[in-house]
Image (tube, rainbow, N blue to C red):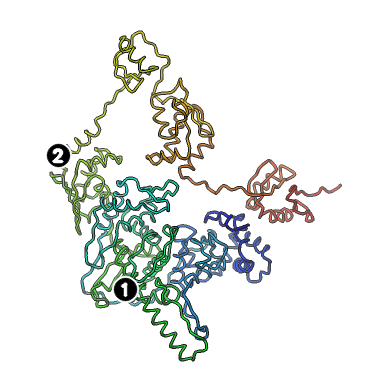
Amino acid sequence: MSYDSIIRTPETLFKPSILAEVLSTFGADDVKRIAVTYLGKGTKLNKADCIKALTKALVTPKAIHQAVADFSDFERTALGLIKLRGQSWASVEELALECLMLKPEKLPADLLSRGYYSTSHKHYGRLNELLRKGIVFPLTGNHLDLSSYHHSFEVAANPLVLNEIRGIQLPSLSIQPVDGPQLARFVKRPSEIVLRLVAFEQAITKVGAMNLTAKGIPAKTIFPKLQKLLGWEDSSKSPFAFTDPVAFFFWLFRAAGVLQFQFDVREVLVLRQNSPISQPYLQQVTQWLKAYRSIVSWHEPCPPGLYLYYRDEDRIRETTFNGFRAALLLALGMLPDPTAWYRISHLSEALYGQLGYSFTLGRNSNSLHFWREKSLEEKKRAIDEWKASHRKNWDSHDEVFIRQALYGPLFQLGVVEFAGDDDKPGQPGCFRLTEVGRVALARMYGQSVESSSTKFIPQPDKPCWLIQPNFDVMVYLESASAEQLSLIERVGSRQHVDASTATYRLTRDATYQALESGLNIEGIIRQLQASSLKPMPEAVIRSMTDWASRRERLSVHLNAQVLEFESAQAREKALKSGQVTGEPIGDTFLLVTSAVKNLSAFSVIAYEPALPRCISVEDTGRILVHRDLRDLLIVDQLSELAEPIGTDQMEWHITEKSVRAAMKKGWTVSEILNQLHRRVNRNLPPVLNLAIQCWGGAALPEPTTLKKQVVLQLPTHDLAEAIANSSHFMQFIGEQIGPRAFLIPDVLAEMMHQLLIQYGFIEKTTPLNTDNPTPQRKKKQS
């Protein structure tokens, strides 16, 4: 079987049926190396037998426990970094460089005799060690040595293996602290950071539709619209001038799961329920750091001369920039004293020591060549010249990237602070972790940390603003929680922001937008008053209430009677004859205002206590409206969810396209299903119920596949029931298809055959017959 036909996901990879198929795509030597890890060094099985034994061992907790006990500290720590992600898989680029940070590769000892050395693909070296031993598995491809030619975007670890990893101890980075600088310091206040995050979240909810191009990347109009809403401009000449902050926060929110790309309909959805902003910043910053590590389609400003190549598909995948960010964050988590000051140049030197001979962003001087026939002195001189050129290349590319990462995203997220130093004239040369950064990195890498400070955690419900009679709101940022900042961003128009305060203005337009977003005026005023340092001016309350009432001036008729006539002419005739009086609605309806004289209705439809059940729905999605039971609302309701068939609006069709269109208007899958359940006269067909959920984006627990399988036919009901209740047997069974029949995956048929022989259910001499698979033990003659 081709590996391309195997559906691998982190959830299904380690199921016996999939695992056996994946192992069969590897070479015999690869399979045997993995067998040594889990079966022991004395294993001398052929490939087929190795696969059978490995398939069993990799799903057996006892075998996994014994294997993990022999793992090295490096292997256990690498697995711990996967587990700390909260999942069983990791990006190849990220994990590859994290592995080098844990166990760097040095120059080979026989370099003088080689005559050639290149860093090409070397950054996969330590990760490839884990792959060759079967400690992790690639999710795509059939090679256990990753390179640019044989690549996988993610690798996954066996959940049973991860369960054996209880905690990790990171090694210390080789870097020396410096004395606390006495010059000016630069630090971002958490309130400034939270305000910017809140402002961006509000902007993406107000900007309207955000579309994707045919290549799956955001349309060019998105960022200018967000820039106009946010008004972010940074003309500062300091090193902290952040280039293109709108694009950074857009991709950061996407990496955090707040923005979701729907490639099939080319739209970007905002999932505010995934936003960390509602949490105190000390809790949410770890999530932002993880998102920063995995951010795609954006990178720190690159140094001159660094050649970048992007394919269209790379714009939504991890690249070497993700790997370098992962290495930098891990380096910050490995600082020997998290509270001390360090020089940025020393951090760059420490990273070079861990990564330099295996990875650099600048690839111009990464290969060493010399003829083996040269003299020993010439060879040494060539190596020394290459080392100097290699280090110069690092300083001009990678160190610049490190500085931009520190000055940009990590400073903007409040993780680091800076101080002046003579190390780099005109630039802050020293840094240290802020308390927020220290706690966040410790949580990110599962390390213990003590934090007694609460000044970085805004207390909710504490008054934090003053509302002036002129509708200005002065917000004191140090006292404001994320929830309060989110509220004022929704109901006010931001005017000015400085280090400690922000000014907003309550306006009619801002109030309208808040009401359109789902708030009500009573709730807005109540929340504004609750967070105000002084009572809210009565004139402001009256004005905001008036603005809301103008928007909500609608006519409501209780116990209304509406008559439907066969045509507009019939309605006009009834009005002129005095049979009925009322207000015409549409073409054929009449809102009755007086008693009907000598006029009897063909049928009466009541809308209370429940709407009439006037439609039938078929498995195909075809909807029929019963003419005698239809009501005034049914056409408008169906037009939101389905497409009409014909012109009389009595027949409709609900499809994937119509469900997608309804969701674009704001409907959820549960609302669509609820609407149909309320109007259908019989139960909604189960197959259509599930189809609507899938059209709406819900994923089935496992991929649906059609596979060739073997049927196991058992002779008695007792034996069938016993096997069905056995966890040992059921791991090799697909499903039960009859009282005494089971489906067995093709790759597991031989294993099941041997198991039946082992338990004595069939004779040892009975061959596996896949054409007539009804194995049973011969009866003994008495």
Number of numbered discs visible in the structure rendering: 2
Can residue 347 be seen at all in this image of the molecule? no
In this view, the mark in front (1 or 2): 1
Horizontal and vertical percent position of residue 172: 40, 73
Count residues near mark 2 (Cα–Cα under 10 Å), then give few for <14, some for 14-19, many for 20+.
few
Q: Could you say which is closer to the camera, residue 586 or residue 604?
A: 586
The local secondary structure at tag 1 comes to helix
Residue at mark 1 to residue at mark 2: CA–CA distance: 55 Å
Q: Residue 490: x and y, percent? A: 26, 46
Q: What residue type is labelled 1?
A: Ile
Disc 2 marks which residue?
538
The residue sitting at 39% across, 41% down in the picture is 664
Q: Is mark 2 on a helix, strand or loop?
A: helix
Which of these two is toward me, 13 or 39?
13
Residue 617 image label: none
Asked whether residue 374 is in view, the answer is: yes
To which quarter of the image does residue 142 belong?
A: bottom right
From the top left corner, tell me how far across and down residue 214 is, in percent.
Answer: 42, 51
* Amino acid at circle 2: Glu
305 lies left or right of 545: right
Q: Identify the residue at horizontal 40%, vertical 14% (top origin).
A: 601
Check disc 1 and report the residue beneath it: 344
Q: Position of residue 389 (x, y in %)?
A: 39, 80
Q: Quadrant of the N terminus?
A: bottom right
Of the two numbered discs 1 and 2 on the same chain, state the one appearing first in sequence: 1
